[in-house]
Image (cartoon, coloured by chain):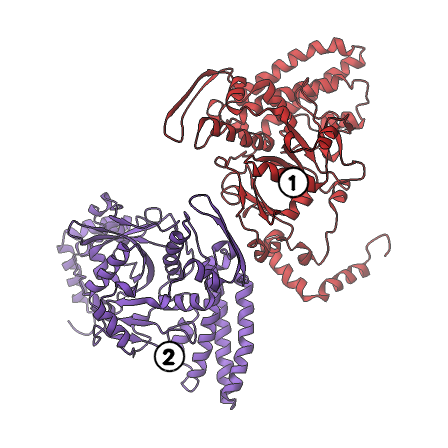
Chain colours: A purple, B red
Amino acid sequence: MKEQLCKQDITALFENYEKDSKLKNSQRTVSRNGILESAIDDVYLKNDYSSFSIDLDSGDITNQKRSGRCWMFGGLNVLRAIAIRKLNVKNIEFSQAYLQFFDKLEKANFFLEKVIELIDEPYDSRLNVFALDSMIQDGGHFVMFSNLVKKYGIVPIEFMGETKVSSDTGELNKILSSLLAKDMMILRNRKAEGVRLPSLRNLKEVMMKDIFKVIAVSLGLPVTEFTYQYKDKKDKFVRMEKMTPVEFFNKVIGTELDDYIPLGDAKLPMMKDNTSYTSEYVNNVIGGKPVIFFNVPNSVVKNAVVESLKAKECVWFGSDVGAQSLRKEGKLIDGIYKLDDLFDVDFSMSKYDRLAYRSSFCTHAMTFTGVNLDEKGNPTRFKVENSWGKENGKDGYFVMSDKWFDEYVYQVFVNKKFVPEEYLKSFEASKPVEISPFDTLFMKMD
Amino acid sequence: MATEITLNDLKSFEKDFDKSDKNLAIMDAVCTNGIVNCAISNEDSKKLTHAFSTEVEGGNVTDQKRSGRCWMFAATNVMRFEVMKNLNLPNMELSQSYPLFYDKLEKANYFLEAILTTLDEKTSSRTIAFLLSSPMGDGGQWDMFADLIRKYGICPKSCMPETFSSSNTLSLDKYLTLKLREYAKTLRTQHEKGKKEEDLRPMKKKMLTTIYRMLVIALGKPPLKFTFETRDKKNNFVSIKDITPVDFYNTYVKLDLSDYVSVINAPTSDKPFNRSFTVNFLGNVKGGKPVRYLNLPIKELKMMAINQLKDGNAVWFGSDVGQYCDRLSGKMSKEIFNLENLFSTEFPLTKAERLDYGESLMTHAMTLTGVNLVRGRPNRWKVENSWGPANGNNGFFVMDDKWFDEFTYQVVINKKYLTPEQLKAYESDPIVLEPWDPMGSLAL
């Protein structure tokens, strides 16, 4: 073939296509039913795979609606499973809007600090563009969740329920983005006029006041103190007198969030197992813990998940939920779409190659709440609590095949007691290597 | 200011409006979202939570749909709980179309009798105008429901289920009203021609025969006997065969209706506390017990309600539900409506002033099923409504204590929670109120 597509090439492409009689069938079904619908392997539709040998109590399903807060929902779902057991209640839900409020506030401060840090770079440098494009959006990582909870605590949902804006964040993000873009411009212009750092920070203080106004009008003010009362499973009435959100967290959860260790299976070229990677440009709370990737073999990741579930602990994880999945039916099964057959094209690519070439990466955080183990104790499928409401999946729960775990789960957070000694040691000893925030590892989940 | 609005006045109104730039921001928000959506304060709303230290058990939330049967729903919600207890059922609902049928029939008779006893009044008199204004609404009162139960009993919902017209009473009421006004005209014209009350009463039978036919066509025939079958909490089969609605009430509900009295709070100067009242021309069952209210200070009403709830029994109550009520979240509180701030004005009328100036009266009956007590004092109340599970917290509403003070007019209380003095006041000769008195309003 030459550089350009010439007439003969086009004719040859036509002829090649016509030759393959199977494609005619594909064309007919696809034109009427769409691509993915036509590629579904219906073997997987017949069984709903909804029983699990280990199946934890995890409360009523939640709904992040039109927002990118999956990582908070996942985190809060892990915490409430602890609270449900501790308080012996049927259900409890923690306010996502409460954390969202402080996430936006911290992200704005994080952005302005990075603007000051990068003030000598050209305004359109890749890092500056990255900051403008991504820093105020909804997405996040587990560590960003734990940074917020450690600093601000949590509150039951009745003390800060959803509002129009918390459930549909498009408008707020757009308005905050324009305000921050203006702030960036002002800071850079003042710097060019010779204004020094301390004065720039004074300017930041003024800017944060405006940001606070926008967030507070949109989401309402978070509570600072509250009295919580509930009835437990035995119908016993309990009242917890006035406390702050941090005190509430300490009382009903009390878990040390820093004990949750990231175990990753997301190796970019030149990355090694047993090594931590981080980027200082991906976070929300200045002064909080860094977002870290710690790579270990896939079997170690999976084993830690199974051990956690056996000990009745739910597990937060990040994966590429859009790959090989049925949203409505709630199925995450590798091979559910027979695209190779439909198009007569080979799509195969390895997990790490997909990650390096940006065809798949962590897009969404959810929670493992169960697993089915065969007679040898090996997992055959996992139960997944999602935050897409009850209309998707089986009452909101998804099922993930063991193979899908291998291919599309990139990271989990488990308590350090479930991490084998040798890995824990190297995690604690390893100094995180700073890598580029543009790598697919640091795409924020939403 | 002159008698007319001058151009200068308009200019000064506008100047006053433009003086505060807050007004412009509020105008923009209200024009797009409406008054209530902009007035409800999320901050204050979230403080009013649906959690209560004292709660009574009950069944699943019911739905009166497009009808004014709240008073029947609230009463059957209290009564069905007795059936659930007595038969150990996880849930059950009593028929609301069964009492609706007999309520309509009795109301028709009550109206014709009222016309027969006012034949000498002018058609333009306030009494006749009142009688003709709404002879066949859906609304009612606790005492009216008690009369229906005593005479007709009750049956489970499955034995007389909803029909199109029981859930949408508009057309049925319209055509029954048309007929009743025609009958009023016939009776009064015959009287003008010289016929006496005794000569006219025989005509009533033919009239009621027609009303009965219309009712059966719209609502179906009420059962004289029925069989009720279900499963109890232990999954045992329960079968109650060939029972009359009156026997069903006496066997499975068993509440002694003469134990329950209506206590009202009407703090207007014309109604002394610790006196009983009745209302002229308010009722449905001719020959039943006339309505009777005992007027007490609001504190005493609340004390009785709390005592009844603490003993595990729900409380039928009447209030003006349209005031400061966020239907969606099911929250009733003046605090969550920032209307005064929105319009930069005050709404300072007191409860008595609202009654006197036609701003508020009892419009709706619901059931109190819980209360939150802090050091023995109520700060909010749990309310079971009959607007289906899509409103409020799965159909349940929460009312703050201030709202109770301001907009609750009536509670129905077991006599045992009344002091001997209160009971004596209830039983004393009632003061008769005019039919158009605000305390004569019906719950819809």
B11 or B63: nearer the eye? B63
Separation of marks 1 and 2 at Cα, in angstroms: 67 Å
Residue at x 38% of width, y 73% of height: A289
Which image quadrant for residue B256? top right
State the count of labels.
Answer: 2
Q: Is A161 situated left or right of A74 in this image?
A: right
- The picture places residue B89, in percent across and down from the top left corner, at 44, 30
Quickly name the residue at label 1. B303
Q: Looking at the image, which residue sits at the far right? A: B2
B233 or A240: nearer the eye? A240
Q: Nearer the viewer, mark 1 or mark 2?
A: 1
Quarter of the image for the C terminus of chain B: give it.
top right
Q: Amino acid at mark 1?
A: Met
Residue neighbourhood size for the residue with mark 2, other residues' Cα within 10 Å, grouped as few (<14), some (14–19), many (≥20) = some
Q: Is A363 situated left or right of B32 in this image?
A: left
Name the subunit of mark 1.
B
Quickly name the residue at label 2. A127
Q: Label 2's element?
A: helix
Residue at x 87% of width, y 55% of height: B2
Residue at x 56% of width, y 20% of height: B153
Share a chain, discs 1 and 2? no
- The picture places residue A362, in percent across and down from the top left corner, at 30, 65
Q: Amino acid at mark 2?
A: Leu
